[in-house]
Image: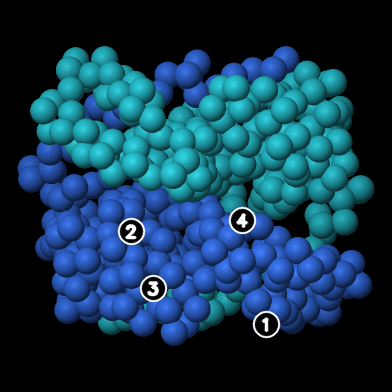
Chain colours: A cyan, B blue
């Protein structure tokens, strides 16, 4: 089931602008992102969902004019925290306490230790760690889109500084790390649609230590 | 379907050593990793599958004595390329040519441009980029395990230098980035098994620009 979906998907190069993603499909993709595992449950990123045509056009201009950004109905922007702060980590503990009816001493002590580890580190190191967590959710978003029959184009080819500026991310303590336009493939205009999916052979990917 | 699996899984704290992962389950998890999308299809990582008890014990010692590393039947070690090199990128193009019966001029030119971009960058920057790709596959591996009814513990809490040493990764141009012990939960001994899964509310995770 999962493999069928992973084989169906590909980095769509041409989207059909006449076939938008339905609201229920978008919701389920966002819920999968919400469920993605992250280090210590921090979820150190946010997702900006862009449907505004002018903003999509600006994103396209900041991303080597890739047409999926305007032909797709939605663009998800994954934006990682620019740093770990006591306030951000305390908010995670508060959310745990809210949802579990209190935070145990073990949980509180765990996150205090985490602050002791993370807060002395550089913002750059902490952002990089946060970005890695966003990539876990990004991979799960691509998977979730496939389960919805929604095409997606995982995209790193853009100018993060420009995207941050377009969306006002820096002021919110966020930095864009990936884009994910969503839509439906326009196979006739997509050079990649008919090509075999290529992956490393298993023996080049995996080593066993038995 | 996907959501049900993502809700079923959790970062298992206690594995039952009497219930190993079956070979077919392991194969399907590895196949999902193989199918994970990565930037330009480079798949810049390898996965070491450790079942050897002595090696698992050494990994445990390098990872704050976390018991899942020996109680689980398998440990997957995700190890990212330490750098991008012309040889590594050329091997990707060769594999595309092999599987598609030749590489088009477009494909060849694309990867030449990529070499122009990546090779002048520092090894640290390239490794970090490779690590992010490994995290995409890592998230999909966790998802795939859930589809198999296999428990897994996404794990960053270990000493990468020690793990690299234990597995001889540096000599192979690899650096460990995450561990993923696989097995089956021992619910009675797992403090986390009964607790509510906590995630940020959707309005704290998602902003819409419509």
N-terminal of the pair, mark 4 or mark 2, is 4
| Mark earlier in primary sequence (2, 1) | 1
Left/right of residue A184 with respect to residue B205 in the rendered view: right
Mark number for residue B113? none
Tag 4 near tag 3, CB within 8 Å:
no
Distance of label 3 from label 1 (alpha carbons): 22 Å
Q: Chain of mark 4?
A: B
Q: Which mark is residue B48?
A: 3
> Which callout, 3 or 2, points at the residue further toward the start of the chain?
3
Residue ID for mark 2: B180
Residue A31 location (% of width, % of height): 49, 28
Question: CA separation, marks 3 and 2?
Answer: 10 Å
Q: Residue at x 61, y 66 (%)?
A: B122
Residue at mark 2: chain: B
| Residue B37 circle label | 4
The residue that appears at 81% across and 54% down in the rendered structure is: A193
Q: Which residue is the site of mark 1?
A: B87
């Amino acid at each position: 089931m999962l493999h069928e979906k992973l084989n169906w998907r590909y980095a769509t190069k041409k989207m059909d602008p006449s076939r938008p993603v339905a609201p229920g499909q978008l919701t389920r993709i966002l819920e999968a992102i919400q469920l993605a595992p992250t280090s210590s449950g921090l979820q150190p990123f946010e997702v900006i969902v862009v449907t505004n045509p002018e903003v999509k056009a600006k994103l396209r201009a900041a991303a080597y004019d890739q047409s999926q950004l305007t032909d797709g109905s939605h663009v998800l922007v994954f934006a990682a925290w620019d740093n770990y702060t006591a306030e951000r980590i305390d908010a995670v503990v508060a959310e745990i306490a809210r949802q579990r009816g209190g935070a145990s001493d073990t949980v509180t002590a765990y996150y205090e230790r985490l602050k002791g580890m993370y807060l002395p580190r550089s913002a750059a190191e902490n952002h990089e760690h946060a970005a890695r967590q966003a990539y876990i959710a990004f991979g799960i978003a691509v998977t979730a889109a496939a389960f919805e029959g929604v095409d997606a184009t995982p995209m790193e080819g853009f100018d993060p500084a420009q995207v941050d500026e377009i969306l006002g991310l820096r002021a919110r303590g966020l930095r864009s790390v990936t884009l994910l336009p969503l839509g439906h493939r326009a196979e006739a205009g997509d050079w990649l649609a008919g090509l075999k999916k290529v992956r490393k052979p298993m023996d080049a990917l995996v080593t066993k230590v038995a």
